[in-house]
Amino acid sequence: MTVHSAFEPQRPDPAMGGIIKLACLAVGGQGGGVLTGWIEDLARANGYVCQATSVAGVAQRTGATVYYVEMCPDTGQQPIFSLMPAAGDVDIMITAEMMEAGRAIIRGFVTPDRTVLITSTHRALAVSEKMVPGDGIASSAEVMAAAEVAAKSFIAADFDAVAIKAGSVISATLFGALAASGALPFPRAAFEAAIRGGGKGVEPSLRAFAAGFDAALAGALPPQPAPEPKAMEVRGPDHLLRGWTDLVQRAARLPAPAVEMAERGLRKVVEFQDLAYGAEYLGRLEGVATRDRDPFTVTLEAAKYIANAMAYDDVIRVADIKTRGTRMGRIKAEMGLKPGQVMQLTEFLHPRAEEIAGMLPRRWGEKISASPAWMARLDRWFNHGRRMRTDGLRAYLMLYVLGGLKSRRRGTLRHAQEVAHLDRWLGDAMGHIDRDYALCAEVIRCRRLVKGYSDTHVRGLSKFDRVMEGIALVAGRDDAADWARRLRETALKDEEGKALEGALATVRSFL
């Protein structure tokens, strides 16, 4: 938390005719409308004339909803209020998420001569951040640094976590931070009275208000140590547990730097399929280890990426994950479901013809895939968005049955395709281990490009293939490993692939 303010109530600038201008940026579910309503009630109850407007965004696809409030003392004359905030003309900016603070600064709503900026430091990732193939998360530290310079006073804390701990939502803690800031000329009791006047969820909101007030005044909190990783717990019938123990002991005999990652990879592939699949994973990894040498970087990377390649996302896996009890419990916890409340869960599915053909037995799937007429039929039957209420029996059972088909997965066309791709990739990587150890490791890391389901998976494969083509061009050069890393990182940061094409053009230019 960072605070730059005397926290004394501030009187409006006389040059502005006594009008206080407050803007709030919030996305769906953060209670921006409730917060605005409290601010309106607060102002009017204390002898102020007030106007509030809002312009809805579409969650974080096109931006947050902008709530705007103007208020001034009631002098008996009707003031002229604006409908929207203007750059350089905002006294108080409240943002319910860290990147919204950054957007407010970029749009010029935060200025060092007048604006009090109040923001929560937690992140609700924007669609643009999720779309990046690699790590597309924007830097909160950069926003914090910009806010220090851009705002007259700056209050930041994880008001979302504070609200959850208090059993309420972030609008209440932000209202508490607003009271603590002194940016409005009203006492704390007036803020609390506005909450009571709402008549709904009063006690949880007052608790969160007080917690937000205290958090705004508390100053910087010491960083919390990272929690110790939980030991892997495995449960099941005794004969399967004995098989699992044998596999874990086998993984422990790998080179020491790779053991921990190998155990995690083993768990992932066994959960994906079965113990036999776990033994297959260890067999591949042991083959890498026998050709590796100190510091065993190649084995360590292979332990991670072979597991990822073997635990691919297919229709069966997606259906299995969507019907797990642990997932339902997690969603209920995230939604704050209370006893007696009913949750309706709608899943969106959009399988392509290729996913449907991939579920078929290999030979049958190959014939279907080779037939344009049959692929057109599958596309017509399945390639459109479906919304399924999995809190109902029919849709849930359909997904449950699909998820239960994993015993047949190893005979499907999709599995044959994934195994062939894995073997080619690993063979290409190990072909470099004797001549260029660093390049071998970089090629193994390139498997990071392949992830996801349906169209996401196709795009990842396309980028992987283009990066591997570029690596083939630079193989044998002293800087081949460096170029492999550059190509991979460029592909991870570039959704459309334009930057990758530029990097490949550069590689071709010096050949």
Image (spheres, helix red, strand yellow):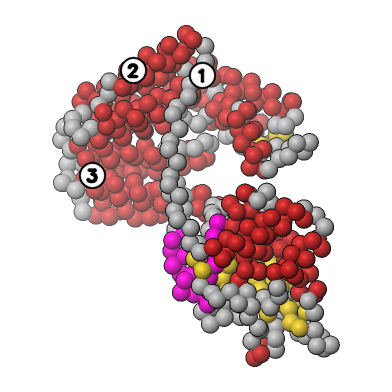
Which badge, 2 or 3, comes first in the chain's sequence? 2
Mark 2 nearby-residue class (10 Å; few <14, some 14–19, many ≥20): few
Residue ID at (55%, 56%): 158
Q: Which residue is drawn at 46% across and 14% down?
A: 241
Q: Mark 3 points at which residue?
A: 481
Q: In which quarter of the view is residue 182 placed?
A: bottom right
Q: Position of residue 219 (x, y in %)?
A: 51, 64
Give above or below for 146 relative to 406: below
| Residue 249 - label | 2
Q: Is residue 159 visible?
A: yes
Q: Is residue 157 covered in magenta?
A: yes
Q: Which of 98 and 282 is in front in this view?
A: 98
Taking the view exactly as shown, the residue that stands out farthest to the bottom is 15
For badge 1, the amino acid type reads Arg
**Residue visible at 45% across and 32% down in the picture:** 230
Q: State the residue position of label 1.
A: 235
Residue 308 sits in quarter: top left
Left or right relative to 414: residue 300: left
Q: Is residue 269 above or below residue 142?
A: above
Please tell me which residue lies in front, 474 or 295: 295
Q: Height in image: 300 above or below 191? A: above
Query: Mark 1 vs mark 3: which is more N-terminal?
Result: 1
Please provide the residue range marked out in magenta: 140-158
- Give the CA separation, mark 1 to mark 3: 42 Å
* Left or right relative to 139: residue 215: right
